[in-house]
C-alpha cells in the first residue's frame, strides 16, 4: 500500500512540475517584467520586497500568484513599470522621476553599503544586478562613497517566438552620487533594451544565463575518486577482517558444542549472551518512531535526488524542489507509519495510539519550533522569508489532510501485515549481568568512530552542498550526489556492523540503542562542520541570517541522525540475526 502512495505522489509531482510549458510570443507583444526581492549579497536568506526601497513603483501594486516553492524561497513578485515588448529594441525610456528625502537617501545608502542586489523575473528567467556601487576609500582615515544606478540596460536573446535569455548590465552607465547631497533631490530612472537572435533551444536556455553569482562548482573528479577509493579500501578492510574473525568464531563455537562436556567452561564471547541479545530494549515507542521517520527521509532523499537527475528542477522552473520536498514529505508519511507500526508490532508493543502520534510528531514538532523562531525573527525584520498567513495555513492543511492520515494508514497496515520478530535464540526471563565496559567500548568512543568515518566519506561533497544551500552556487552534480549518498549508506552500515560485533564480543548485549547513537552521531559532526563553514568559509552576518542558518542547519543535522541511525540499526539487526543463526544452540 505504501508503495502505491509513493507512486501516486511521484505522479502528482511530475504533473505539477511538468505543467509549466514554454510560452510563445508574437512580435511586439508585451511581456511582463516582475520585480521580486532585494537583499545583502553575502546573506542569501535575508531578502526583502523590492518595493520596500524608495524605487519606482506603480500607483497600485499587483502581485503575481506564486507557487508554494517560490513563497518558501522568499519570492514576492509584483508588477513593475518596465514596458518591454518582444523583439523591440530601444535606447532609452524613462521609467519614473523620484524625489528623495533624507530618509530615502539614508535607506539607499545603507542598502548600497550592504551590497544589496535586486532580482527581477522576465518570462520565468531571473535577472539580477546590484542596486548601486560602493567605492572604498583609504584605510586611514576610513571612508567610502555610495553611488546609485539609475539606468539599467537589458539584453535579451530569442529563438523564433520564444525568449531564451535575459540579463541586465550597467556597463558604461554613470551612476548618481549619494554623497554630500542635500535632500530633497530629484533623480530620473531610465532603461534600455536590446534583442539578439540565437540558435539555442528553449530546453537549453538555462545554460545561457549570465552568471551573476560566482560559479565555482566544478566536477571535482579528483576528490570524488579519492573518496571512492578510500571508502572501498575501508569497506574491504573492515569486511575482510570481520569475515575472517566470524569464520573463526563459527568454527570454535560449533566445535565446542560438539564436545559438549566443557561447553559451560569454555563458552565465552558473543555466544555466551545468546539468551539476552534479543531482549527487547526500553523505550520501544521512541525506537520505532525513529526507524519510521528515518526510513521516510531515506525515501524522500532518494526521490529528490532521482527527480533532480531527471532534470525536473531547472533554473526556469522556479523553486520546484521546495514544492517537491513539501509534497513528498507529506506523501511518504505512509512509509514512516508502516515501518514504525510494523516494527512496534514485532516488539510486542501495545500503545498503538502513542506510537502513531510519536511517529507523526517526531520531526514535525521540532520543525515547527525551529520554523516558528525563524519566521518570528523574519517577520520582525519585515523580510520576505516570513511566510504569509495563507501559506502557513496551506502547509498545515497539507500535513493534516495528507501527512497525518497517511501516517495513521501506514501504522494500521504495518500493524496488520507485520510478522513475528523471528529471533534465532530464546530470551531468558532474568537478564545476564554485564561485565565492566572498558573505555574503548564506551558509548562516547562508539559515537566518535561511528560518526566520524561516515562523515569523512561525505566531507568533500558537504562543502558543495553548503555552498549551494547557504551560498550562491547552483548545484547540478546530482549523479555524484547520488553516488556519495550510496557511499554514505554503505560506510554507515559496515561501521555499524563492526561496532556491534565489537560490543557483543565484550559480552554486552545492549546493542539496540547503541547502534542508533553510534552512527546517528554523524549529525554532531555535520553540525561541527556547519560552525566551521559559517565562521571560516562564508561572509554571512546579522541576526536574521544567523538564526535562519543555525535553525535550519540543526534540523538538517537531525535529519542526518534519523537517516543514519535507521541504516545503522537495521544493518546491526540483520548482522546479529545472521551470526546467531549460524551457530549451534541447545
Image (tube, rainbow, N blue to C red):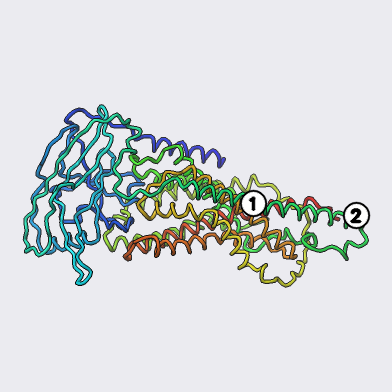
Closer-to-camera residue (400/152): 152
- Structural crowding at the residue carrying mark 1, measured as other residues with C-alpha within 10 Å and reported as few (<14), some (14–19) or many (≥20): some
Q: Indicate the position of residue 397 as horizontal and vertical percent values.
A: 40, 49
> Is tag 2's residue or tag 1's residue first in the polypeptide sequence?
1
Q: Quadrant of the C terminus?
A: bottom right
At 27% from the left and 56% from the top, the residue drawn is 39
Position of residue 413 in the picture relative to residue 45 (left or right): right
Looking at the figure, which quarter contains the N terminus?
A: top right
- Circles 2, 1 touching at the beta carbon (< 8 Å): no
**Element class at badge 1:** helix
Residue drawn at x 69%, y 64% as measured from the top left = 510
Residue that badge 2 annotates: 258
User: 397 left or right of 182?
Assistant: right
Label 2: which secondary element: helix
Instruction: Please tell me whether mark 2 or mark 1 is closer to you in this view.
Output: 1
Left/right placement of residue 494 relative to residue 368 reads: right
- Residue 33, numbered label: none
Disc 2 versus disc 1: distance between alpha carbons? Answer: 34 Å
Residue 314 falls left or right of residue 30: right
Res 289 seen here: no
Instruction: Return the mark for residue 235.
Output: 1
399 over 163 or under it: above or below: below
Amino acid at each position: 500500500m505504501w508503495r502505491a502512495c509513493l507512486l501516486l505522489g511521484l505522479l502528482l509531482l511530475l504533473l505539477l512540475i511538468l505543467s509549466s510549458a514554454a510560452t510563445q510570443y508574437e512580435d511586439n507583444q508585451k511581456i511582463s517584467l516582475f520585480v521580486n526581492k532585494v537583499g545583502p549579497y553575502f546573506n542569501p536568506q535575508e531578502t526583502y520586497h523590492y518595493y520596500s526601497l524608495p524605487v519606482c513603483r506603480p500607483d497600485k501594486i499587483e502581485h503575481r500568484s506564486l507557487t508554494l516553492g517560490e513563497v518558501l524561497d522568499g519570492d514576492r513578485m509584483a508588477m513593475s513599470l518596465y514596458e518591454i515588448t518582444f523583439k523591440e529594441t530601444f535606447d532609452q525610456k524613462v521609467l519614473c522621476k523620484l524625489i528623495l528625502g533624507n530618509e530615502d537617501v539614508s535607506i539607499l545608502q545603507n542598502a548600497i553599503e550592504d551590497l544589496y542586489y535586486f532580482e527581477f523575473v522576465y518570462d520565468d528567467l531571473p535577472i539580477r544586478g546590484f542596486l548601486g556601487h560602493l567605492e572604498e576609500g583609504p584605510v586611514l582615515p576610513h571612508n567610502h562613497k555610495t553611488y546609485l544606478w539609475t539606468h539599467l540596460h537589458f539584453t535579451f536573446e530569442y529563438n523564433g517566438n520564444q525568449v531564451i535569455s535575459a540579463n541586465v548590465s550597467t556597463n558604461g552607465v554613470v551612476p548618481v552620487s549619494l554623497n554630500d547631497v542635500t535632500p530633497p533631490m530629484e533623480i530620473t530612472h531610465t532603461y534600455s533594451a536590446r534583442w539578439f537572435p540565437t540558435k539555442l533551444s528553449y530546453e537549453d536556455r538555462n545554460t545561457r544565463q549570465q552568471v551573476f553569482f560566482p560559479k565555482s562548482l566544478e566536477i571535482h573528479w579528483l576528490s570524488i575518486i579519492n573518496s571512492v577509493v578510500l571508502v572501498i579500501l575501508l569497506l574491504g578492510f573492515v569486511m575482510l577482517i570481520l569475515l575472517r574473525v566470524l569464520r573463526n568464531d563459527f568454527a570454535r563455537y560449533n566445535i565446542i558444542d560438539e564436545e559438549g562436556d566443557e561447553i559451560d567452561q569454555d563458552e565465552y564471547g558473543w555466544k555466551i549472551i545468546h539468551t539476552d541479545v534479543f531482549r527487547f530494549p526500553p523505550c520501544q515507542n521512541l525506537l520505532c518512531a525513529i526507524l519510521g521517520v528515518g526510513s521516510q527521509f531515506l525515501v524522500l532523499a532518494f526521490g529528490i535526488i532521482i527527480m533532480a537527475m531527471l532534470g525536473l528542477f531547472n533554473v526556469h522552473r522556479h523553486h520546484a524542489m521546495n514544492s517537491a520536498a513539501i509534497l513528498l514529505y507529506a506523501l511518504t508519511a505512509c512509509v514512516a507509519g508502516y515501518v514504525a507500526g510494523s516494527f512496534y508490532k514485532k516488539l510486542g508493543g501495545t500503545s498503538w495510539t502513542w506510537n502513531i502520534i510519536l511517529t507523526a510528531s517526531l520531526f514535525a514538532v521540532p520543525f515547527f519550533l525551529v520554523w516558528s523562531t525563524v519566521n518570528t525573527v523574519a517577520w520582525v525584520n519585515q523580510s520576505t522569508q516570513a511566510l504569509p498567513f495563507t501559506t502557513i495555513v496551506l502547509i498545515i492543511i497539507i500535513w493534516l489532510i495528507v501527512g497525518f492520515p497517511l501516517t495513521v494508514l501506514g501504522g494500521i497496515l504495518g500493524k496488520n501485515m507485520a510478522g513475528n520478530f523471528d529471533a534465532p535464540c530464546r530470551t531468558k526471563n532474568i537478564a545476564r549481568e554485564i561485565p565492566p565496559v572498558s573505555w574503548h567500548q564506551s558509548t562516547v568512543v562508539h559515537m566518535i568512530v561511528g560518526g566520524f568515518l561516515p562523515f569523512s566519506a561525505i566531507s568533500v561533497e558537504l562543502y558543495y552542498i553548503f555552498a549551494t544551500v547557504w551560498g550562491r552556487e547552483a548545484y547540478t552534480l546530482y549523479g555524484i550526489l547520488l553516488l556519495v549518498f550510496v557511499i554514505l549508506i554503505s560506510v554507515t552500515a559496515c561501521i555499524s556492523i563492526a561496532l556491534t560485533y565489537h560490543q557483543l564480543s565484550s559480552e554486552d548485549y545492549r546493542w539496540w540503542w547503541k547502534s542508533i547513537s553510534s552512527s546517528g552521531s554523524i549529525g554532531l559532526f555535520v553540525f561541527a562542520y556547519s560552525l566551521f563553514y559559517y565562521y571560516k568559509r562564508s561572509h554571512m552576518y546579522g541576526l536574521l541570517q544567523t538564526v535562519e542558518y543555525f535553525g535550519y542547519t540543526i534540523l538538517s543535522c537531525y535529519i542526518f541522525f534519523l537517516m543514519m541511525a535507521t541504516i545503522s540499526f537495521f544493518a546491526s539487526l540483520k548482522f546479529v540475526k545472521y551470526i546467531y543463526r549460524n551457530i549451534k544452540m541447545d
